[in-house]
Image (cartoon, rainbow, N blue to C red):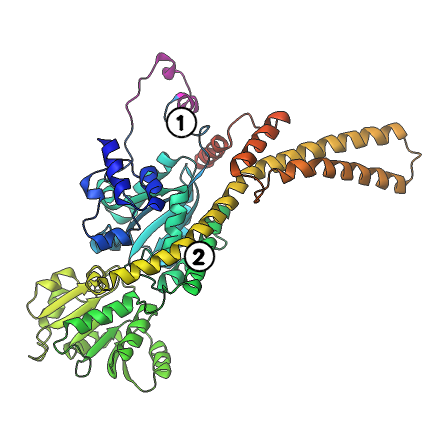
Amino acid sequence: MAASAIGLATSLLPSTSAKRATATATVFSSAAFPSDKDSVFYKRFKIRSSKCPLGFSSEKIDSRALTASPLQLLKSSPANRYTKESSSIVVIGLDVHSTPVEIREKLAIPEAQCPQAITELCAMNHIEEAAVLSTCNRMEIYVVALSQHRGVKEVTEWMSKISGVSVSELCKHQFVLYNKDATQHLFEVAAGLNSLVLGEGQILAQVKQVVKVGQGVAGFDRKVSGLFKHAITVGKRVRSETNIASGSVSVSSAAVELALMKLPDSSFATARVLVIGAGKMGKLVIKHLVAKGCRNMVVVNRTKERVAAIHEELKDVEIIYKPFSEMLACAAEADVVFTSTASETPLFTKEHVEMLPTVRSEIGRRVFIDISVPRNVEPSVSDLETAVLYNVDDLKEVVAANKEDRLRKAMEADTIIQEELNKFEAWKDSLETVPTIKRLKSHCERIRDAELNKCLSKIGDGISGKSKEAIYDLSTAIVKKILHGPMENLRCDDTRTLDEILENMRALNRMFDLEADTAVLEQKVQAKMAQKRK
């Protein structure tokens, strides 16, 4: 049955994505295949596992298990992977395509708490590096895992702990991608291909912010940092070398378009507009309102300065500032209310909205458009006859237009993504040879130093300082020239394949006895466990 499912998957997918389908999906069901053609495009043809990959296989335990140490049990168990796999880049995520906003908002991590989240993730036994990408449309954890299975299990349990959402519920919605698939996913995210609104620019700024926040945080290290920095390069290239950004819209502009669709005359000319929050999203809402003909609005914000700065940019528009203490009074006079704040509790409850006076008859019902995650407007407001409520998940109605144009633009970007993916994979794979290079250099340096000391000891004290220096330089030059050939054959370039480089690495490890007695991954896990016991 699994084989037939894979056959169905690959028949539905373009050839460039077929390998990803079979590599990342472990369990298939009809739920894994989106029914909406547009969502197939937006999910970038990823097949997500319909079953959480956290189960444990039943294994026979022999009599030796009673006396064996936990580490020995791991090494003899079929589940042990320390000596069979290298560390992996993994993304465990939930996004607007797979997860409703009521779950995403529980997982949202404020920017100020991201360093603490990285610290907690890297304290786990099988997580070496980590990064958090948390936006209104997605919550994605990127990690370097010492064991794929155990790493995913630890991260999923952590996500459950911080959100209060059960592991089983998370597994219904989350996707898990490994190595090249995880890298390609982040590149597509940075390029705006995975966004609800194709080509939207705000996500690239959010990816940049991950790097900025992660700087100096223990656990945001070489691989994860390099991954996100390369994703920024991809995002910039896609936007500068393709037409994906031409005519593109953001979540904020889609919210304004949705409001226009719901107004009786599809115009802001007579509508009374209230915007709550003047941060990045709120500012974009204001700008798009102006672009659509809105010439006066009320903006509620914590500080007056930010609203004044926006007003300075848009001098021909009447923007009235009000503090949060007057929010309900302002809502009472508004026909359309946009909310985009970072508040973790609702600003508008059902009781609040129920007490507001009805809007003019030509408007019909008061329109609330909530693009915040967590949500600013209580979902039960939609039960009222006097109000209509939309959240970020409802923006799909706006972006349903021009599907063919978006698909064409995405295909333009795909070539760039594949180029950069190959570059990143070559860089990442080259890191595998770094320990061998260091050990070989150290090995040769020890021999050089020992033989040099023997030579100088035989010569005795009658040698001048200049002669000693010349002998030292000679020994160094000889070692350097001997190492030149092996080092060149351990470096990634266009003259040799990755398989050749890795084979060269293994040969050098064998010839010079450079391999440690214990697997590197095993050492790292042992060190983590020892640190936790202190």
Identify the residue at image location x=55%, y=25%. 517
Residue 388 coordinates in the image, percent (x, y): 12, 67
Question: What are the residue bounds of the magenta stretch?
Answer: 57-76
Residue position marked by numbered label 2 in the rendering: 234
- Residue drawn at x 32%, y 69% as measured from the top left: 247
Q: Nearer the viewer, residue 115 or 92?
A: 92
State the residue at coordinates (43%, 25%): 71
Amino acid type at circle 1 is Asn
Report the amino acid beneath label 2.
Val
- Residue 80 bears which disc, if any? 1
Q: Is residue 457 left or right of residue 302?
A: right
Residue positioned most to the bottom? 316
Looking at the rendering, in which quadrant would you find the N terminus? top left
Looking at this view, name the residue that lies furthest to the top. 63
**At numbered mark 2, what does the secondary structure look like: helix, strand or loop?**
helix
Q: Residue 174 location in percent, x, y?
A: 27, 45
Where is residue 7 drawn, in percent x and y?
A: 26, 36
Above-or-below relation of 349 to 441: below
Single out the residue that lies furthest toward the right: 462
Q: Nearer the viewer, residue 377 or 85?
A: 85
Q: Report helix, strand or loop for mark 1.
A: loop
